[in-house]
Structures are given as C-alpha cells and as structure tokens.
Image (cartoon, helix red, strand yellow):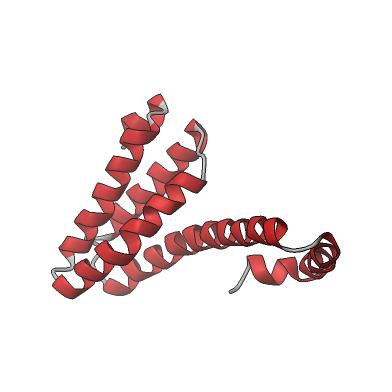
Amino acid sequence: MKSAAGSGNLERFYECDLKFHRTVWKLGNNRYAIQFLENIVAPLFGFYVMRTYRNAKQLSHEVEIHRAILDAIPLETPSQARQVMREKLHYYLRALVKLFVKLVVTLLRAILPNRIRTTLADRSRRSRAHVLDPF
C-alpha cells in the first residue's frame, strides 16, 4: 500500500486498501459481520473510489491512517483500539458526508428548475456547517 501510494498507482493502492479492510474484518472472526461488510461496505468502497481522486500526498496520509489502525489492533485494552478507530472513522465519515452532499447537489441541479435550485442553495449555505459536521 505504501509503495503504491508513493508511486501514485491508484489501482494497486485501492486493491491493497480493500484487502487491508477485508483482513481486519476477518480478524473479528464473525461470519455475519464479514458477510454484512462484504455486501454493504465493499460496494460503497467502490463507489467512493470512483467518485474521489487522491494525489500522492493524500494517499500517503491514508497510509498513515491505516498504519495507526494496524498499530491499534494489538493494544492491551480494547478501549484504546476503539478510540483509534473512532478517530479514523470520523475522518472517513466526514469525507463520505461531503461526497454524499456533492452527489445530492449534482442530482438536484440536474432535475430541479433554476428558481428552486437557488432557494435550496441559499438554505444550504446557511446550514452547511451543520451538514458537514454531524457530530
């Protein structure tokens, strides 16, 4: 993953990324969770990859995040590992919320008349901080 990030090989990077997550899922040894994650998260992962672009610096940052997750797995207390995961998941959740908002705006622009779009855009500007930081 690190070498793919350094060389900017997005295809290899995302292959390694998904393999990393699948390995972590399997470590939980819960076949129901694995099945759920494969059915739900893997397709969402594909959508996320298709809709986002990462440069070498961002890929390197993602490698650091994954390293922190990996380092948290053998921690002595589950609460320490949970805290690391919360921090890292918060980062990705914010990115997904931004992506979702972008997608909705794109869809609305395509289907709504201009007058309604302007009204919605005005409302959105006023409440944007609330939407982008749901926590």
Tell me how many marks there are: 0
In depth, the one of 1 and 48 nearer the eye is 48
Q: Residue at x 72, y 67 (%)?
A: 129
Q: Residue at x 66, y 69 (%)?
A: 131
In depth, the one of 109 and 54 nearer the eye is 109
Q: Residue at x 25, y 62 (%)?
A: 38
Q: Would you say 66 lies left or right of 55 here?
A: left
* x and y, in percent, of residue 84 in the image: 39, 63
Q: Residue at x 50, y 63 (%)?
A: 93
User: Quick check: 4 above or below 46?
Assistant: above
Residue reaching furthest to the top: 7
Q: Would you say 41 lies left or right of 60 here?
A: left
Q: Quadrant of residue 110?
A: bottom right
In depth, the one of 80 and 47 nearer the eye is 47
- Quadrant of the frame with the C terminus: bottom right
* x and y, in percent, of residue 50 in the image: 45, 45
- Quadrant of the frame with the N terminus: top left
User: Quick check: 121 above or below 55?
Assistant: below
* x and y, in percent, of residue 49 in the image: 43, 46
* x and y, in percent, of residue 24 in the image: 23, 58
